[in-house]
Image: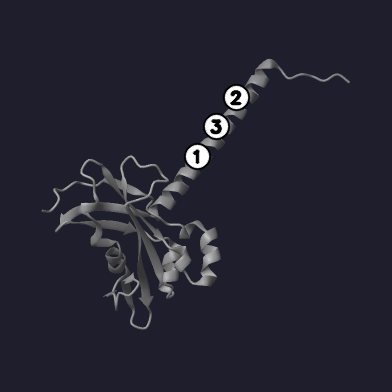
């Protein structure tokens, strides 16, 4: 039995059609991934503003953080599950290696929770802030959660005038503070892994106080 080979022009046509199909599929996949990444980025945390200032020989930090909680996190909040934010602050030499010790390395915890009986939101710093602040709307509570005002960072006397320093800040949803039954799901699902990533900026130098 003799096999009949297709004409050369037909082979070229099929190759071109296959190429167009492959390109179309690749572009569709790329667009889908881009839209997915944009959707994830829309539900994440970001540092809007961060700055330091000197007061009586102490350097204080203020920042504004935009907490765009995922739908899963908001659903848990509305059902009475407290959400805890971990704010990680560092002061490091500008040319330090990753394994070098930081001058400042502190972790602060803030919590937002909904009280169904009073229909109010409570924002507090942990541990030990008595009562916290109460808000009628979730939007106001989340905005207050993102306000860091004049946090003590470091004494000017610990800074070498000849050395350049950086401040590092990162805020993330603390999965370890969720109720135990929720933690396995939170580790497996992307909607719970929310963070600003590291924000870094040079630490301004002020004259040392006499």
Mark 2–mark 3 Cα distance, whole angstroms, equals 11 Å
Query: Where residue 24 sits: x, y (%)?
Result: 54, 34
Which numbered disc covers residue 55? none
Point out the frontmost of discs 3 and 1.
Answer: 1
Which numbered disc covers residue 23? 3
Q: Residue at x 39, y 42 (%)?
A: 97
Closer to the chain start, of discs 3 and 1, is 3
Q: Secondary structure at mark 1?
A: helix
Mark 3–mark 1 Cα distance, whole angstroms, equals 10 Å
Q: Residue at x 27, y 45 (%)?
A: 165
Residue 60 occupies quadrant: bottom left
Residue in front for this viewpoint, 19 or 206: 206
Residue in front for this viewpoint, 39 or 46: 46
Closer to the chain start, of discs 2 and 3, is 2
In the image, taking residue 197 as reference, residue 62 lies left or right, namely: left
Whether residue 26 is situated above or below residue 181 in the rendered picture: above
Mark 2–mark 1 Cα distance, whole angstroms, equals 21 Å
Q: Residue at x 26, y 62 (%)?
A: 147
Residue in front for this viewpoint, 83 or 8: 83
In the image, taking residue 209 as reference, residue 185 lies left or right, namely: right
Q: Residues within 10 Å of mark 1 (few under 14, many from 20)?
A: few
Q: Which residue is mark 2?
A: 16
In the image, taking residue 78 as reference, residue 158 lies left or right, namely: left
Closer to the chain start, of discs 2 and 1, is 2
Q: Residue at x 59, y 28 (%)?
A: 19
Q: Secondary structure at mark 3?
A: helix
Q: Secondary structure at mark 2?
A: helix
Q: Which residue is mark 1?
A: 30
Q: How many marks?
A: 3
Q: Residues within 10 Å of mark 3 (few under 14, many from 20)?
A: few
């Amino acid at each position: 039995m003799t096999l009949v080979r297709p004409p050369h022009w037909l082979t070229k046509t099929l190759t071109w059609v296959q190429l167009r199909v492959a390109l179309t599929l690749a572009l569709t996949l790329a667009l889908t991934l881009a839209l997915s990444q944009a959707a994830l980025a829309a539900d994440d945390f970001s540092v809007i503003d961060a700055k330091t200032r000197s007061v009586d020989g102490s350097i204080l930090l203020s920042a504004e953080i935009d907490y765009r909680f995922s739908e899963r996190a908001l659903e848990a909040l509305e059902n009475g599950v407290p959400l805890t934010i971990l704010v990680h602050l560092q002061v490091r030499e500008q040319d330090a290696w990753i394994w070098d010790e930081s001058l400042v390395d502190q972790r602060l915890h803030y919590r937002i929770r909904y009280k169904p009986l009073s229909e109010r939101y409570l924002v507090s710093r942990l541990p030990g802030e008595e009562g916290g602040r109460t808000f009628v709307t979730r939007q106001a509570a989340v905005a207050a959660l993102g306000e860091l005002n004049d946090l003590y960072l470091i004494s000017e006397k610990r800074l070498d005038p000849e050395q350049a320093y950086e401040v590092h800040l990162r805020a993330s949803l603390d999965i370890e503070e969720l109720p135990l039954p929720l933690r396995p799901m939170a580790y497996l699902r992307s909607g719970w892994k929310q963070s600003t990533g590291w924000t870094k900026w040079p630490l301004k130098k002020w004259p040392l106080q006499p």
